[in-house]
Image (spheres, rainbow, N blue to C red):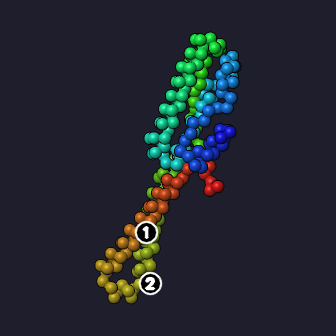
Amino acid sequence: MSSLYEASEFVRKHGWGAIVIAPRLSDQIASTNNVYYDPRSALTVLVSSGRNFLVSGKFVQPTLDATARQVVQVFTAQHIMAIRSGQQPLGSALMAVTPIGYTTKDVAPFSLGIAPVAPIFTLFATIACTLAAQVLVKTSAQELHRRVHHIHLTFIFHGLMLLWSTILALYSTLAFLAFRGPKHDAS
């Protein structure tokens, strides 16, 4: 990838996370007298928490953060050794202690607004479908109601409603898990 934007788009559409190294990082660090150099811009940890909030929060982001910290520690140790050996001049004390750092960017954030909406929508849809089916059975199936024992209708009706509720719950769960943030598009 040639830019942070391309890496962000790739993670948002296809990945769970990535670590991006800033271009021309060595040149920026070599000019240690540059007061505008931001050590936290050296590495960017990209994560997509909207893909699956639990997996992303428990496994992906801690692993990416640990890897970024390890890169920072190794680079800092090598940078201090280069300053001690005289290969690189000491620009500032802050530059010697923290030559690089990292920032974390969530490219497809988890939307907390959808979490309570999905189960409530499923519940209301189930209630509406149940009431609609009851009204349909009561109004249009009076003759069927008289011929068949009520216990059979009760079992069939509740079985169909359980099936319908399961399908709606599965749909809302899949919609909830597939949501990957406000910028998600089909392309």
Residue type at mark 1? Trp
> Quadrant where the C terminus lies?
bottom right
Q: Quadrant of the N terminus?
A: top right
Q: Nearer the viewer, residue 79 or 143?
A: 79
Instruction: Name the disc covering residue 164, or none.
Output: 1
x and y, in percent, of residue 174 in the image: 49, 57
Residue that mark 2 sits on = 140
Residue at mark 1 to residue at mark 2: CA–CA distance: 20 Å
Q: Viewer-proximal residue, 78 or 125? A: 78
For the point 43% across and 68% down, the residue is 164
Q: Is residue 9 above or below residue 43?
A: below
Q: Could you tell me which residue is drawn at 34 percent across and 79 percent down?
A: 153
Q: Does 116 sit above or below residue 45?
A: below
Q: Which quadrant of the structure image shows residue 41?
A: top right
Image location (x, y in percent) of residue 179: 54, 52
Instruction: Please determine whether, in this image, residue 23 is positioned above or below residue 95.
Output: below
